[in-house]
Image (cartoon, rainbow, N blue to C red):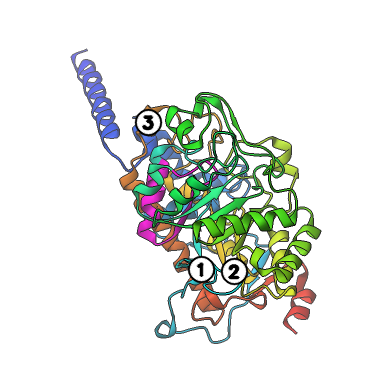
Amino acid sequence: MFAFEIIVVLAISGVAALYLHDIRQTKHTILRNYPVIGHIRYFAETWGEYMRQYQYLPDWAERPFNRLERSWVYRSAKGVSNLVSFGSENVPSFIFRNAAFPVLDEDKKPYPGKLIGIAAGPGACREPYQARSFFNISGMSYGALSHAAVTALSRGAKLAGVWMSTGEGGLSRFHLEGGGDIVMQIGTAKYGVRDEHGALSEERLREIAAYPQVKMFEVKLAQGAKPGKGGILPGHKVTAEIAKIRGIPEGKDSISPNRHLDIGSIEELGAFIVRVRTITGKPVGVKFVLGDASFVDEWFADCAEHPERCPDYVQIDGGEGGTGAAPEPLADYVGLPITQALPYVAGLRYEHGLQNRIRIIASGKLVTPDKVAWALCMGADFVSSARGFMFSLGCIQAMKCGSGNCPTGVTAVDERMIKGLDPADKSVRVARYAQKMVDEVGVISHSCGLTDPSGFAPKHVTEIERGVAGFRAQTG
C-alpha cells in the first residue's frame, strides 16, 4: 500500500511539474493554453506519420488545407527540415518544366524587387514603392485577429522584409509596432479613414499617409471570403479600442456595406483612385474577386485611355473563401478561383498594354512554393497570403475564427487564450516561413533555368490533366 501511495504522489508531482513547464514556456501556444492535455495533440502529430497506414483519411484529404500543405508551413516556420522521403504523396494538377541545364549555385541571383507606382506622367505619385519581396502578408484586420497575432505578424514582416496589409479594419498601434512596411486597406465602410458620417475623411488619410511605414493604399472592392458582401466582425469582438480605430459603436456587429457607396462605376472608381493618390502621394491599388469578366476588360480599356485613373496595382483574390466570417454560399459558390481568375486578368493586362504600368498581386490559398511559383508563372508580380501566415503563427485550422474561441489565440477574444501566443517567438516563425517560401520558390526557378523568380513565364509550367498529347503540343 505504501508503494502505491508513493507512485500516486510521484504521478501527481510529475503532472504538476509538467503543468508548470507548459504555462511558462512560450514556443507552443496550445501547451500554454491547454497545459498537460495539450501534449496529446503533439503526441498524435509526432506519431501520426507512423500510424497513417492504418487509418482511412489520407494526408491530402483534409479541407480547406490538407495536412501536407499545413505541415510544410509548420515545418518552415519552426525551421525544421522540409525534405521528404520515399517519393511524393502529392497528385499535382501542374508541373514545372525543368531545364536541361539548371542554374549553378554561383550564378543564382537574389530577387531584384519591383517598383509599384510611377514617379512621372499621368497617374504618378510622389512616393513610389520599391517592393523587396514577391511573397507578402495579405489583409487581416485587427479585431478579426488578436492583438498578439497582429503584433507577431508586424514584427515578422520587418524581420523578413515583406509588407503587411492592415485588412479593412484600419491601422492600429500593433501594425506599427513591428516597424515593417504596411499597406493601408480601405474597405467599403472606410474604417480608419472615415468621418462621423461614414464618408472618406481626407484629414484621416493624410494622418495615416504621414507614417513612413505606410507604403501603399488599397481600395477593397471584394474579398474571396464573401464576394458581394462587406466585412463581418461580430459584436463580441468590437472592443473599445477596435471601435475607436474603426470609428464605430462598441459591442455592436461591425458589418460593412456590400460595396463602396461612392463607387458605382468604372469612372467613379478611377476618380476615387486619383483622389486617394493625390491626397496621400503614395501608390494606390484595388483588390477584387473576378466574377464579371467584362468589367476588367472595360476597366483596363479605360485605364489605357485615361492613364491618370489607372491603379498602380490590382490584387486578385480567388473566390475560395478566406480568413473572415462569411455566409457559406458566398464562400463556396461565388467568385472565380484564382486558378482561373489570374491567367484571365494577366492576359487582359497584356492585351491593353498595361503590363509595365499595373502590377498584379495574387491571393487565394497560395501557401506553398508550388502554388506561389505557379502564380508568378501566370503573370503575378507578387503573391500575398493570409492563411499561410496564420499557420505560421500556430493556427491549427480549428475553424473557430468568427467565434472568438480560437484555441491558439490567433483570432481569440479571451485574453487568457491570447496570452498563449507569444509575439516574440511567433514573429520569428513568421519570418522563417516567408524566407523559406522565397528560398524554395527560388529553387524551382533555378531548376527551370532561371537565375531568380522574376523570370518566370507561362512556358515554365504545364497543366498535366491534359495527358501526354497535351504536354507534347504545349512543348512543341
Counting residues from the start of the chain, the first of labels 3 and 1 encountered is 3
Residue at 26 percent of width and 34 percent of height: 24
The tag on residue 441 is 1
Counting residues from the start of the chain, the first of labels 2 and 3 encountered is 3
Residue 376 picture location, percent across and down: 59, 69
Amino acid type at image mark 3: Asn
Q: Is residue 219 above or below residue 174?
A: below
Magenta-tinted stretch? 149-171
Alpha-carbon span between mark 1 and mark 2: 10 Å
State the image quarter where residue 198 is shown. top right
Amino acid type at image mark 2: Leu
Residue at 34 percent of width and 30 percent of height: 35
Residue 294 picture location, percent across and down: 81, 59
Name the residue that disc number 2 marks: 376
- Label pair 1/2, CB-CB below 8 angstroms: yes
Q: Is residue 406 above or below residue 448?
A: above
Name the residue that disc number 3 marks: 33
393 sits to left or right of 114: left
**Label 2 secondary element:** helix
Instruction: Point out the residue furthest to the top here.
Output: 1
Queried whether the magenta region covers residue 295, the answer comes back as: no
**Label 1 secondary element:** helix
